[in-house]
Image (cartoon, rainbow, N blue to C red):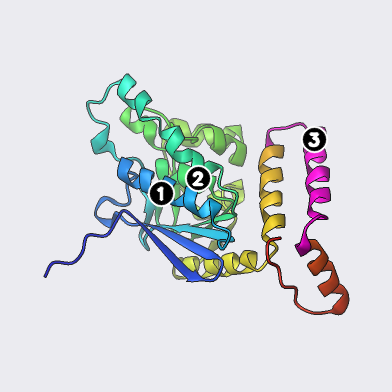
Amino acid sequence: MSAPILPPVLLEFPEAGIAVLRLNRPQATNALSLELQELLSQHFADLGQNRQVRCILLTGGEQVFAAGGDITSMVGVGAIDIHQRHTERLWAPIRHCPKPVIAAVCGYAYGGGCELAMIADIIVAGRGARFAQPEIRIGIMPGIGGTQRLVRAVGKAKAMRMALTGQPISAEEAWIAGLISEVVADEQVFEHALQIARHIAAMPPLAAEQIKEVILAGMDASLEAGLALERKANALLFASQDQKEGMQAFLEKRAPRFEGR
């Protein structure tokens, strides 16, 4: 009997409050086919609405996170065809997911893989990981955030170098540049990312969602506008049961029990 054919994205729930999305096209170095993108989009849409999920962990394989877009599906395709794919709509549920997202990156995160990792709120990378926007080498350019998110993460000078040369940077360089959150040994990437997810999942989910929303919204706003968003979000949390539970637990010197209300 032949082995069952697994989907290009695997969904797991290893612990309460944590969802793991695992890219699963090892035969194609996890290239982001349209099928993979559609399935990833649907999972993020569903998980974003799932009140039992408090943190999402996104990962690839032990050798590669994702080596970019599926070039075989682009050869011979015209501009209108590419436009009508509207990949920005597929990526919208990922971009707008209210839950904290952690990317666990081993190996290559190239092209679309780098762009996908950059959507995450926290990136944990192995020492052997590499990040690149190599689209220029095949006559195109990043098309799902690789110019805009990259320059916001690492600044103009480094973003220009990466996008104009297509050359990869190491995990250590990515950490120094501010592209990623932490660098750990390759064999510890997933477990370390899971520990962070476990810690976040134990936090009050309403506060976590508000923190994510305000940080992201404030990045492209003036300082005054960002501070106004922060004040209003902070005040809103005082209407939650979790705020009352958290402060009462602090006074009583016990562990809080957060329920997302």
Farthest residue toward the right?
251
Residue 106 visible? The answer is: no
Circle 2 Cα neighbour tier, 10 Å, few/some/many (<14 / 14–19 / ≥20): many
Q: Is residue 183 left or right of residue 209?
A: left
Q: Is residue 148 left or right of residue 200?
A: left
Give the distance between the C-alpha atoms of the residues marked 2 and 3, in whole angstroms: 26 Å
Residue 239 covered by magenta stretch: yes
Residue 119 covered by magenta stretch: no
**Image point (29%, 56%), residue name:** 7
Establish if 216 lies above or below 3. above
Circle 3 Cα neighbour tier, 10 Å, few/some/many (<14 / 14–19 / ≥20): few
Mark 3 = which residue? 223
The answer to which of marks 2 and 1 sits earlier in the sequence is 1
The answer to whether mark 1 and mark 3 are in CB contact below 8 A is no
Q: Secondary structure at mark 3?
A: helix
Q: Which quadrant of the figure contains the N terminus?
A: bottom left
User: Which amino acid lies under the numbered mark 2 shown in the image of this protein?
Assistant: Ile
Q: Which of the two discs, 1 and 3, sits closer to the camera?
A: 1
User: Which amino acid lies under the numbered mark 3 shown in the image of this protein?
Assistant: Leu
Mark 1 = which residue? 40
Dominant SS in magenta: helix
User: Which amino acid lies under the numbered mark 1 shown in the image of this protein?
Assistant: Leu
Residue 114 visible? The answer is: yes
Magenta residues (range): 219-242
State the image quarter where residue 202 is shown.
bottom right
Image x and y of residue 221, in percent: 72, 32
Establish if 189 lies above or below 70. below
Q: What's the mark number on residue 94?
A: 2
